[in-house]
């Protein structure tokens, strides 16, 4: 079916993204995978190309374009290119809204120009060794010392953990407040007591630096409180729908691309004297995956449109997230199987897609958490 959610302006932007990927990313990506981190230069190139801060007002150096469909285009093309390590979506779609909606005027002028130019790379630090989806389990504390906070604790699995310059940290500011005693503090590169641990060794997304972070009596100025004191829970819940949509969009784009690759492969690959595509089982596999992708795409495009209009609710975002990511995981496994032994070789895109995409059902809220949200909305 022809997609109808994008205008000619969106498609022109798609061509800009493709050009950026071909020129600035793909020639260097294998080296970044070996290094375990992308270069800072590519972030600056993304800033020059106008790919950072799409929704940030122009007065702060951004694109001034709140239409989420531009972010969707970016996610689709990055996924098709197989470059999950360059976490521009995290920067734009997950952290960006916190800065644009919660920051004071002084904070916006201090941080947003660098956010948009690529000079200030961002991360958000929620997960701890003993607290993932359960925010009430957060143990990182921030003690009020008058004109500053003293931050102590540790975080893990933090995307952009090594390369980031600004880290939005979720910390407990009212110990007895539970999930409603948490605040967002912005920790900046170079603050005394802020240390980065090792670049974690993951099974996929090798060039996406994921790190442990440690805070030992870090003095965080009161001016770096982001949003309301003890308001982190509400702030986080407000922005989770967009985070989950960004993940879902990447998931369906990844599944579709894998089906395209595998369809071409089975037409060319021969077994028992004829192309794999002549085998009924292979045709049925392709038919099933193509149908699942088409049905999911229709729902995702509706969710993209609703989110761009500001009408997407948390339940539909959760439905989109768990369904699309589980589809991506299932499709990657089936496509790898159809590639046979070649599918296990890293030189084939299906192998990297298999490992890069596996995290999708986990971060941004696990499949189980998504189902819990949906179930509660239906059953109370």
Image (tube, helix red, strand yellow):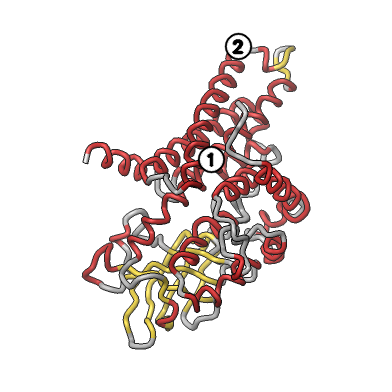
> Would residue 363 be seen by someone viewing this image from the given angle?
no
- Tag of residue 251: 1
Quadrant (top left/top right/bottom left/bottom right) for the N terminus: top right
> Seen in the image, is 246 located left or right of residue 51?
left
Task: Provide residue 18's location: percent of width, then percent of height.
Answer: 72, 47
Q: Is residue 276 above or below residue 117?
A: above
> Where the C terminus falls, by quadrant?
top left
Residue 202 image position (x, y, % from top left) = 54, 52
Query: Residue at horizontal 42%, vertical 65%?
Result: 155
Q: Name the front one of labels 2 and 1.
A: 1
Left or right: 52 in relation to 98: right
Tag 2, which secondary structure?
A: helix
Residue occupying image coordinates x 44% and y 62%: 156
Residue 181 lies, in percent from the top left, at 27, 68
Give the quarter of the image for residue 316.
Answer: top left
How many numbered marks are there?
2
Q: Nearer the viewer, residue 359 or 59?
A: 59
Gap in angstroms between the C-alphas marked 2 and 1: 27 Å
Q: Secondary structure at mark 1?
A: helix
Vertically, is 364 above or below 131?
Answer: above
- Find out whether the residues at labels 2 and 1 contact each other: C-beta distance under 8 Å: no
Q: Residues within 10 Å of mark 1 (few under 14, many from 20)?
A: many
Q: What's the residue at 76%, 49% (across, down)?
A: 19
Local packing at callout 2 (Cα closer than 10 Å; few below 14, some 14-19, many 20+) is few
| On screen, residue 5 above or below 13 | above
Image coords of residue 30 (percent x, y): 71, 52
Disc nearer the start of the sequence (2/1): 1
Q: Nearer the viewer, residue 263 or 310?
A: 310
Find residue 280 and name its label.
Answer: 2
Residue 307 seen in this snapshot: yes
């Amino acid at each position: 079916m022809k997609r109808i959610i994008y205008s000619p302006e969106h498609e022109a932007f798609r061509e800009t993204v493709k050009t950026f990927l071909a020129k600035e990313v793909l020639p260097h990506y294998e080296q970044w995978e070996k290094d375990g981190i992308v270069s800072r230069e590519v972030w600056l190139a993304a800033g020059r190309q106008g790919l950072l801060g799409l929704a940030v007002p122009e007065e702060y150096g951004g694109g001034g374009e709140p239409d989420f469909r531009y972010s969707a285009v970016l996610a689709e093309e990055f996924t098709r290119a197989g470059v999950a390590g360059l976490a521009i979506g995290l920067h734009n779609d997950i952290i960006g809204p916190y800065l644009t909606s919660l920051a004071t005027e002084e904070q916006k002028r201090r941080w947003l120009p660098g956010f948009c130019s690529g000079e200030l790379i961002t991360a958000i630090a929620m997960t701890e060794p003993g607290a993932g989806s359960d925010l009430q389990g957060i143990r990182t504390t921030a003690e009020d010392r008058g004109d500053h906070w003293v931050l102590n604790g540790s975080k893990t699995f933090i995307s952009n953990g090594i390369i980031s310059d600004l880290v939005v940290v979720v910390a407990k500011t009212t110990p007895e407040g539970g999930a409603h005693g948490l605040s967002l503090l912005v920790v900046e590169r170079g603050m005394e007591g802020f240390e980065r641990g090792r670049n974690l060794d993951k099974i996929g997304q090798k060039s996406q630096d994921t790190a442990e972070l440690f805070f030992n009596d870090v003095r965080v100025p009161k001016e770096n409180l982001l949003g309301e004191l003890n308001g982190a829970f509400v702030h986080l819940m407000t922005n989770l729908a967009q985070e989950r949509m960004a993940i879902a969009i990447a998931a369906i784009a990844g599944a579709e691309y894998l089906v395209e690759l595998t369809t071409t492969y089975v037409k060319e690959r021969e077994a028992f004297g004829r192309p794999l595509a002549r085998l009924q089982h292979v045709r049925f596999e392709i038919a099933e995956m193509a149908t699942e992708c088409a049905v999911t795409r229709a729902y995702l495009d509706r969710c993209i449109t609703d989110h761009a209009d500001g009408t997407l609710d948390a339940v539909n975002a959760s439905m989109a997230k768990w369904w699309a990511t589980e589809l991506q995981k299932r499709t990657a496994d089936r496509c790898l199987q159809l590639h046979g032994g070649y599918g296990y070789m890293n030189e084939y895109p299906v192998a990297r897609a298999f490992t890069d995409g596996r995290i999708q059902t986990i971060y941004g809220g696990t499949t189980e958490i998504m189902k819990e949200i949906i179930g509660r909305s239906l059953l109370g």
